[in-house]
Image: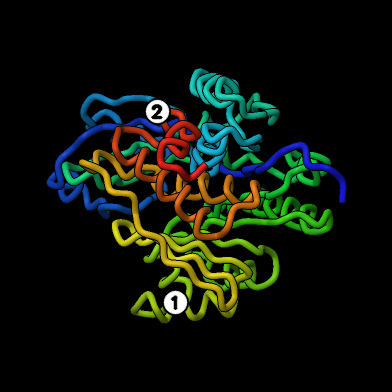
Amino acid sequence: MSETTTDVLGIGNAIVDVLSRTEDAFLEARGIAKGAMQLIDEAQAATLYSEMGPGVEMSGGSAANTIAGLASFGGRGAFVGKVRDDQLGDVFAHDIRSIGVEFQTGAATAGASTARCLVLVTPDGERTLNTFLGASTGLGPDDVDEDQVAGASITYLEGYLWDPPEAKEAFLKAARTARKAGRDVALTLSDPFCVERHRDEFLELVRNEVNIVFANEAEIMSLYQVDNFDDALQAAKADCGLAALTRSAAGCVIADGDEVHVVDAVKVDRVVDTTGAGDLFAAGFLFGLTRGKPLAACGQLGSLAASEVISHVGARPETSLADLAKSHGIL
């Protein structure tokens, strides 16, 4: 097999997050489901933005956050996602390139503006996402470079891509190109509501198109329509090549056939903002995999990265994850 040029190629929605602290009552008054992600249109985004408190803008997007985390560990990352040639699109492109991630996707010159996610953070650190997908839905098969995919050790795909039809085609092209090149394909289930929208197709994906699956407790239980985690774990063991399942404060469970590892969460003094916890867990885990680490160590790297990101506002690391891992004796 040829040498890889990239450790992980992430493909997902290119989004700029706008984070604002709020109270539970703000969500309740607007009928917004706490802790979930809902899709909104441009008019709803404008209304909600006008009602929110002061906001902090920073680049986001699930797979992009994962690749940002990978880069912080010292991994070679690349990202594919669509922005518009506008102010937020420039912010996104600058931010991801400035941390050493390859980002070549051409900006759209017409159509909807760059995607944004209005993130409402309640006092308990829980984040509620209100996403206007905008230009990110314009991602299509032509944006997927087959040579770039074939050169990546792992292609990492976010489940949110399954919503827009063109992006779904890009997703499938990338997965099949990677598999043809003998590379690994990873999928994150993204969100329980995303799973509910696409359950049958996601089951098909985990059984036939991908060999690494990331999910949290709620997502994997939704996928298999079961009421407890253990039943979901058994189903995942039967269906998935490698499953990395996160359980918040209870840590994570890594299953590879009959090989199962339970890894504790890394304790933090205070949970400030859970935005990006799953994304950064995937970053650490994938970095470990590309370095040939044992699965339990991959889980530890993931848990460490998640602990860093929930200790501050925002979905990307603020300190070097490589240095953090070294200080914990994991690298």
Q: Is residue 151 left or right of residue 254?
A: right
Q: In this view, does 85 lie to the left or right of 124?
A: right
* Residue drawn 59% across the image and 52% down it: 293
In the rendered image of this protein, does residue 15 appear above or below residue 251? above
Q: Residue 70 occupies which quadrant of the picture? A: top right
* Residue drawn 38% across the image and 66% down it: 217
Q: Would you call the spot at circle 2 few (<14 residues within 10 Å), some (14-19), or many (20 or more)? A: some
In front of the other: 8 or 254: 254
In front of the other: 294 or 222: 294
Q: Is mark 2 on a helix, strand or loop?
A: loop
Q: Would you call the spot at circle 1 few (<14 residues within 10 Å), some (14-19), or many (20 or more)? A: many
Of pointers 1 and 2, the one earlier in the residue sequence: 1
Q: Distance between the residues labelled 1 and 2?
A: 34 Å
- Residue 305: give x, y in percent of width and height: 43, 42
In the rendered image of this protein, does residue 269 appear above or below residue 174? above
In the rendered image of this protein, does residue 181 appear above or below residue 69? below
In front of the other: 200 or 152: 152
* Residue drawn 36% across the image and 62% down it: 247
- Residue 92: give x, y in percent of width and height: 53, 25
* Residue drawn 71% across the image and 56% down it: 184
Residue 265 is labelled as none
* Amino acid type at image mark 1: Ala
Mark 1, residue position? 232
Q: Residue 318 occupies which quadrant of the picture? A: top left
Task: Answer yes or no: is residue 40 visible.
Answer: no
Q: Is mark 1 on a helix, strand or loop?
A: helix
- Residue 128: give x, y in percent of width and height: 30, 46
Mark 2, residue position? 318
